[in-house]
Image (cartoon, helix red, strand yellow):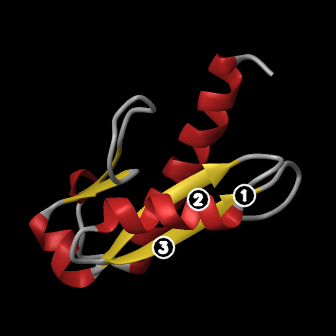
Amino acid sequence: MKPQSAKAKGRNLQKWARDKILESFPSLEPDDVRSTSMGCGGEDLQLSPAARRLFKFSVECKAQERLNVYDAYDQACANSGDYEPILIMKKNRKKP
């Protein structure tokens, strides 16, 4: 798989997670939850202070066919700061 295709898979999963958060909290504006670029370190979803008050989690998204769950969760923990880490995983042709 080309690196560009792999990044597109990850970006689509981040957008799916963003949409689920916005759907769950109708009071949030679309700019309150933003998907980060693939090369950016840290959390995969950037939350505004308003979103952070409602959703007290740090999100890490992984769209990979083969995934080392423990390494991915360790990355989520390292990026979470003071918030509870969440790891969202997706395999090809499976639901997240």
**On screen, 13 above or below 72?**
above
Outermost residue to the right: 93
Q: Earlier in the sequence, mark 1 or mark 3?
A: 1
Mark 2 burial class by Cα count in 10 Å: few <14, some 14-19, many 20+? some
In contact (CB < 8 Å): disc 2 and disc 3: no
Q: Which residue is disc 2 drawn over? A: 72
In x, y percent, where is residue 91?
81, 54
Q: Is residue 89 left or right of residue 59?
A: right
Check disc 3 and report its element: helix, strand or loop.
Answer: strand
Quarter where residue 89 is shown: bottom right
Q: Amino acid at mark 3?
A: Ile
Image quarter of the N terminus: top right
For image coordinates 85% across by 48% down, the residue present is: 92
* Residue 4 in view of the camera: yes
Q: Amino acid at mark 2?
A: Ala
Q: Amino acid at mark 1?
A: Asn
Check disc 2 and report its element: helix, strand or loop.
Answer: helix
For image coordinates 27% across by 77% down, the residue present is: 83
Q: Which residue is disc 3 drawn over? A: 86
Quarter where residue 37 is shown: top left
Q: Is residue 10 left or right of residue 34?
A: right
* Residue 22 in view of the camera: no
In x, y percent, where is residue 28?
24, 69
Residue closest to the eye, 25 or 35: 35
Q: Earlier in the sequence, mark 2 or mark 3?
A: 2
Image quarter of the C terminus: bottom right
Whole-angstrom CA distance, mark 1 to mark 3, is 15 Å
